């Protein structure tokens, strides 16, 4: 059974993780992506090993993506044909990414994972500055789900930015893409979390998950409010800037 010893830590110990969960969910609630990427980047930047950081982030996302998926289904934002084509490849990629990450020593993996996350930040900036959308049926789906799932597990985030953005680039309907990808992400995070538990054990999770959950839950309503006030283009620019800065700083700390 997954039990956390609440006597082993104080509220002060949780503050960094509450702030990480709050800031990541604030952006994710406003933009519809980037909870995993931001929270994982910040966790690694403060010294959490990549595999452990990704495991903790995906455990928290089991709850946040579950609520998000139910909401999208109720609002009929899910394209079930598209869902079926991305969810299975995504789960397979997630298992592979989680397994590969747990087999690599943390000191070796950290610079590469942070490098990947910084590229995600640059990609988001590019998407924000050059957004042109012409609706048409996407053709590359299954390989996208496989790659998105693998990189999401290996990098602790990226499913939303990679899969959603690429489907939009191919011309898919934005509302259906966001709803479908968000719903599929629930099954992806469950699969990835189970893989991490099998390979790392429960000791790798612990109290930080509580902090991430508290921060994420508190930030949820604020993210929705921001989404109504701030243009999506500006939000994507801000996300890209934050990811690039935190990732490059993390790389500097890892190699110095």
Image (tube, rainbow, N blue to C red):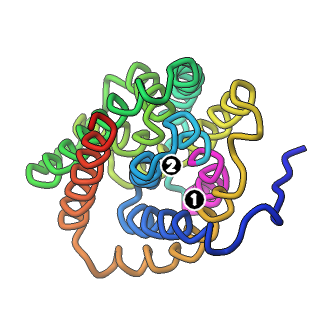
Observer-nearest residue: 196 or 187? Answer: 196
On screen, residue 211 versus residue 115, left or right, reads right
> Does 106 sit above or below residue 169?
above
Tell me which secondary structure the magenta stretch mostly adopts.
Answer: helix
Q: At 43% across and 35% down in the image, what residue appears?
A: 155
Quadrant position of residue 222: bottom left
Quadrant position of residue 134: top left
Residue 177 inside the magenta-drawn segment: no
Q: At 62% across and 67% down in the image, what residue appears?
A: 13
Q: At 64% across and 60% down in the image, what residue appears?
A: 67
Residue 58 inside the magenta-drawn segment: yes
Task: In the rendered structure, find residue 104 and report the number of the disc placed on it.
Answer: none
Badges 1 and 2: C-beta atoms under 8 Å apart? yes
Say few, some or many: other residues with alpha carbon within 10 Å of mark 1 (under 14 / 14 to 19 / 20 or more): some
> Picture coordinates of residue 79 (x, y %)?
49, 43
Observer-nearest residue: 208 or 174? Answer: 208
Q: CA distance from mark 1 to mark 2?
A: 7 Å
Q: Quadrant of the N terminus?
A: top right
Say few, some or many: other residues with alpha carbon within 10 Å of mark 2 (under 14 / 14 to 19 / 20 or more): many
On screen, residue 186 versus residue 229, left or right, reads right
| Boundaries of the magenta span | 57-75
- Find disc 1 in the rendering and name its residue: 68
> Does 242 sit above or below residue 56?
below
Q: Is residue 253 visible?
A: yes
Task: In the rendered structure, find residue 182 and report the number of the disc placed on it.
Answer: 2
Observer-nearest residue: 1 or 120? Answer: 1
| Earlier residue among tags 1 and 2 | 1
> Picture coordinates of residue 3 (x, y %)?
86, 51
> Does 166 sit above or below residue 28?
above
Q: Is residue 172 visible?
A: no
Q: At 72% across and 51% down in the image, what residue appears?
A: 206
Q: Quadrant of the C terminus?
A: top left
């Amino acid at each position: 059974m997954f039990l956390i010893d609440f006597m082993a830590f104080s509220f002060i110990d949780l503050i960094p993780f509450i702030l990480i969960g709050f800031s990541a969910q604030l952006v994710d609630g406003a933009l519809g992506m980037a909870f995993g990427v931001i929270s994982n980047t910040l966790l690694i930047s403060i010294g959490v090993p990549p595999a452990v950081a990704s495991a903790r982030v995906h455990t928290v996302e089991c709850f946040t993506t579950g609520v998000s998926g139910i909401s999208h289904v109720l609002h009929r934002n899910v394209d079930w044909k598209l869902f079926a084509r991305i969810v299975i490849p995504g789960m397979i990629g997630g298992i592979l990414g989680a397994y590969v990450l747990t087999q690599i020593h943390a000191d070796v993996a950290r610079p590469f994972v942070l490098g990947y996350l910084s590229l995600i930040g640059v990609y988001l900036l590019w998407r924000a500055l050059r957004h042109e959308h012409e609706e048409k049926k996407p053709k590359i789906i299954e390989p996208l789900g496989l790659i998105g799932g693998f990189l999401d597990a290996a990098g602790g985030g990226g499913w939303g930015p990679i899969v959603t953005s690429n489907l939009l680039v191919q011309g898919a309907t934005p509302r259906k893409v966001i709803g479908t990808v968000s719903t599929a992400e629930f099954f992806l995070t469950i699969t990835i979390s189970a893989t991490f538990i099998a390979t790392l054990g429960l000791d790798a999770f612990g109290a930080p998950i509580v902090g991430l959950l508290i921060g994420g839950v508190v930030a949820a309503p604020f993210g929705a409010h921001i989404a109504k006030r701030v243009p999506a283009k500006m939000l994507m620019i801000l996300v890209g800037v934050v990811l690039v800065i935190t990732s490059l700083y993390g790389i500097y700390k890892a190699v110095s």
